[in-house]
Amino acid sequence: MDAKEVVLAFWQRMDMNDFFGATEWLGDGFECTWPQSGEVVQGAWNYAMINIHYPSFGPWQFKIENLLVQGDQVVTNVFISDGVQQARAITFSTVHKGKIVKQLEYWPESFMAPPWRSQWIYRSGQQAAEVLPPIERAHCISTDR
């Protein structure tokens, strides 16, 4: 399988909420970096456990909105939702011998557009009033109690 097929297969398993199955596409020594929080996840098992225990209101859906490939590098823009919470992940995956060995994930949060620039922009499908604040962990259903 080429790099694109590997990353697509990984996201397909994530969309099935088969987080251990997704690790099939992660290589030995897999490492995932989250620059915004300064965390590094080492190993496929740790990556699966974080996803299994992440608080949610229902099954997660992962929709790839953009995918770019250059050699063994794959960049994805993924929309993620559990029906209540919504997020976006921008991921940079490095594939080696049919497995993702490194992944750099950015999780940007939505924000209200500042009024000062309103004369130079228009709003895409989402209105300012529809941007919701992040949901606090304490309000989420989870199995890690």
Image: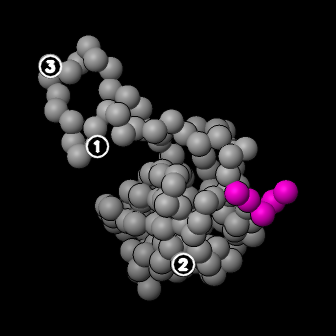
Toward which corner of the image does residue 128 lie, by quadrant? top left
Question: Element under label 1?
Answer: loop
What's the magenta region? 141-145
Under mark 3, the amino acid is Gln
State the residue position of label 2. 16
Work out whether residue 6 can be spotted.
no
State the residue position of label 1. 126
Calculate the distance from the C-alpha at mark 1 to the C-alpha at mark 3.
Answer: 17 Å
Residue 10 placement (x, y as % from top left): 52, 75
Q: Residue shown at 73%/59% (left/top)?
A: 142
State the residue position of label 3. 119
Dot 2 or dot 3: first in sequence order is: 2
**Residues packed near mark 3 inside 10 Å, few (<14), some (14 to 19) or many (20 plus):** few
Q: Which one is closest to the eye, mark 2 or mark 1?
A: 1
Calculate the distance from the C-alpha at mark 2 to the C-alpha at mark 1.
Answer: 27 Å
Under mark 2, the amino acid is Met
Q: Which one is closest to the eye, mark 1 or mark 3?
A: 1
Question: Element under label 2?
Answer: loop
In this picture, is 107 found above or below 118? below
- Quadrant where the N terminus lies? bottom left
Q: Taking 145 as reference, is 11 left or right?
A: left
Magenta span has 105? Answer: no
Residue 12 placement (x, y as % from top left): 48, 77
